[in-house]
Image (cartoon, rainbow, N blue to C red):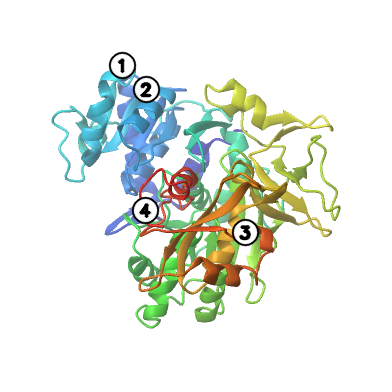
Amino acid sequence: MAFNIADLFEHAVDAVGDRTALVVGDQRLTYAALDDRANRLAHHLADHGMGAGDHIGIYAQNCAEWVEAMIAAFKIRAVPININFRYVADELAYLFDDADLVALVHAASYAPRIAAVRAGLPALRHLVAIDDGGDTADLGSLPYADAIASGAPGRDFGDRSPDDHYVLYTGGTTGLPKGVVWRQEDVFFALGGGIDATTNERITSETQLAEKAAATPAPLVMLCIPPLMHGAAQWATLRSFFEGNTVVFLPRFHPDEVWATVERERANVAMITGDAMGRPMIEALEADPDAHDVSSLFVLSSSAAVFSPTVKDRYLDLLPNLMIVDSIGSSESGHNGMVTVAKGETEMRGGGPTVVAGRDACVLDDSLTPVAAGSGVVGRLARSGNIPVGYHKDEAKTAATFVTGTDGRRYVIPGDFATVEPDGSITLLGRGSVCINSGGEKIFPEEVEAALKAHPAVFDAVVVGVPDTRWGQTVAAVVQPRSGHRPSLDELDRHCRTLIAGYKVPRHLHLVDRVERSPSGKPDYPWATRVATGTTGGPS
C-alpha cells in the first residue's frame, strides 16, 4: 500500500473523473482533464531527463498551470519546489542553488529575474514558461502550451513509493528560506487528510478517501485564497483533491473579488491566512453587506498567521451561522491542533489560540519531557509520529529541530512556546525566535499585536524588541494606522493596559504607511526591527 501524492490524486480521478476539480477565473477543469494535462506535462519533463528525486521549481502566482506542474512532478517521482514570487535576484539565486533545481516552470513575466541569475546555475537545464504576457526571448524558455502538446496523455509512469519526497521551502519569520523534506506518506498523515482532524483516526486504505468521494454526490467547493507557493494553500488543495472536492483560486487577492467569487461559485469553505486577508475581507463585506449573496459559505478556515479575536467577532456579527476554524501547524510539523470559534469565545489567552491538540502533538519542557496538563509549565510545541526527514542540506539545523525526547521518541520542535491546559488543550504563546526578553520577562509579540489591533485606529501592527540599557529589551510597535487616524503612544498605552499586563505594553511607537508581510500573511520581523531601530525608512 502506497500513500503517495500522485497515487492518491489518481484514485480520485478514477472515482470522480467528470466532477469539476479546479476553477481559476473563467477556466474550469474536471478531474479527468486536470489529470490529462498533468500527464502530458509529466511526460514532457520525463522526455527531457527529469525523474525520481529531481527538483523542479514552480515560480508563478495562482493559476491552473501551478497545480498541473505540481501534480506532473509527483507523477514522475520528481519533487516540486515552491518559489516565492516576491523574491528579488539575490534571494532567487540563493533559493535556486540551495534547492538544486534542474528545471523550472515559471510565469513568463518573471523571465528578467531568472535571466539575471541564470549564469550562476549550471544545473538548471530546462525552463518552461507560462504565458502571462511576458517576454522570454532572452531566456529561451519553452512555451507551456508547447510542453503540454508534446507530452503523451497516458499514465505509464511505473510504481511510486511512500518514500518519495515532498519538499516545502519556508522563510518563516526570520532567516533565509529552508527546505523541509518530508516522506510523502508522512506528509499525507500530517497535512493531507490521512488523519481525520475531528476524530484523530488514521486512514487505513489508499483508496478510502476516493471511495468516500464517489459515494458523496455533492462535493464541497473550497475557495483557496492564499498563494500556492505557501504550504497551507498546497495542502488545502491536495487534500480537497484527494476527497473529490472542487477547488477555486483567485489569480490575485482582492477582498471584493473574494466575495464575488463566493457568490459566483457558491463556495462552502474559504481558506485565509489570518488578519492579512481576513481583515480587508470583512471590511469589504461591512462596507456593503448586500452586494453579494454569500449564504453558501459556512466555514472560514485560517492557519499560518494570527487571526485576531476582534476580526473574528466582526465576521460573526455579519455572518452569525459561519463556523470559524483556527488551525495551528507549521511546515516542519504539519497539523498540531484546531479550534472552532463561536461568538463570545474568540479571546486568546496568549499569543495564539487555544486548540484541541492534534494526534501526536504535545508540549516539551527544556529537558524534552512532555509537559503535564494543567501544570502551568511553559514549553515548546512539538510533534512526533509522522514528521519530516529534516532540512535539505542543513544537518546542523536538522539536529537542532528534530530531537529525541526522554521517552525515546523522535520529535520536531519548530520553535513555538506553548502550555497545556487542564483539559489537554494547547495554548500557543508565540514564536521563540521573536520572543522579547524585557527584564527577565518573556513577551510574545503576537499577544501584543492582537491587543494593538483591537484599537479602532489601528489597521495592522507588528511588535519587536529593541535594545534597552536597563531592561535588555523593550517593546516597540510598528503600526499601520487606519486612514485619517494617527494614534499616539499614550492613547495606545491606555488601550493596551485594558487587555495585557503593563510590562507587555509598547514603550515605542513607529507609524508606517504599510506593514510589510509575506504573501502568506506572516509578519516581516526583520523589516519591523529595522524600522524600530531607525535603520530603514518609515515615519515614527
Q: Which residue is mark 2?
A: 50
The residue drawn where x is 68% and y is 53% is 428
Residue 281's disc number: none
Q: Nearer the viewer, mark 2 or mark 4?
A: 4
Q: Residues within 10 Å of mark 4 (few under 14, many from 20)?
A: some
Q: Nearer the viewer, mark 2 or mark 1?
A: 1
Q: Is residue 283 above or below residue 44?
A: below
Q: Which residue is mark 3?
A: 447
Instruction: Look at the image and tell me in which quarter the C terminus lies.
Output: bottom left
* Marks 3/4: CA–CA distance: 24 Å
Q: Secondary structure at mark 2?
A: loop
**Callout 3, which amino acid?**
Glu
Quadrant location of residue 99?
top left
Q: Is residue 188 above or below residue 123?
A: below
Q: Which residue is mark 1?
A: 122
Farthest top residue in view: 122
| Residue 511 visible to an observer of this rendering | yes
Q: Residues within 10 Å of mark 1 (few under 14, many from 20)?
A: few
Q: Which residue is mark 4?
A: 538
State which tag comes first along the sequence, 2 or 1.
2
In the rendered image, residue 156, in percent from the top left (x then y), is placed at: 41, 28
264 relative position to 498: left or right: left
**Callout 2, which amino acid?**
Met
Q: Are marks 1 and 3 in contact (CB under 8 Å)?
A: no
